Image (tube, grey):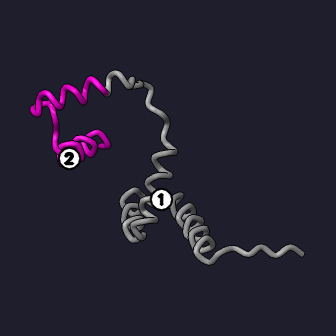
Amino acid sequence: MITLLIPAQRLQNSLAEQRLACMLGCMKLEELTAEAAKLSEDDRASLAARLLHGLEKPHHGVSDEEVINRVREGDANDEVMITFDQLVSGLRFRAR
């Protein structure tokens, strides 16, 4: 007989992940969001990372040169920049 010693935190995380996976199949997005809000900050960050990594890669790419040009444009003209709140608002609008 082989005995595996699993650290308590790892076992707890594994059980929490299994519970969450089970709940995903029968929960609406609002319910899932409410449950995720109950997780610790570290667990929410881990969940967010897993969800983001599970998304398809965009069908468009941005070259390093394009990024450098945009940064230069922002440095030269503050009016092309947006605030964090504007970014979040735009992302929420796209998610609808």
For disc 1, the neighbor class at 10 Å (few under 14, some 14 to 19, many from 20) is: few
Distance between the Cα atoms at labels 2 and 1?
22 Å
The image quadrant of residue 74 is top left
Q: Quadrant of the C terminus?
A: top left
Instruction: Name the foreground residue: 68 vs 55.
Output: 68
Residue 91 percent coordinates (x, y)? 27, 42
The residue shown at (11%, 33%) is: 78
Q: Considering only vertical position in the picture, is 30 above or below 8? A: above
The residue beneath circle 1 is 46
Where is residue 38 shown, x and y percent of the image?
39, 71
Q: Is residue 81 left or right of residue 1?
A: left
The disc at residue 84 is 2
Q: Amino acid at mark 1?
A: Ser
Is 44 or 5 nearer to us in this picture? Answer: 5
Q: Is residue 53 left or right of residue 41?
A: right
Checking the image for residue 30, the label placed there is none
Provide the major secondary structure of the magenta segment: helix
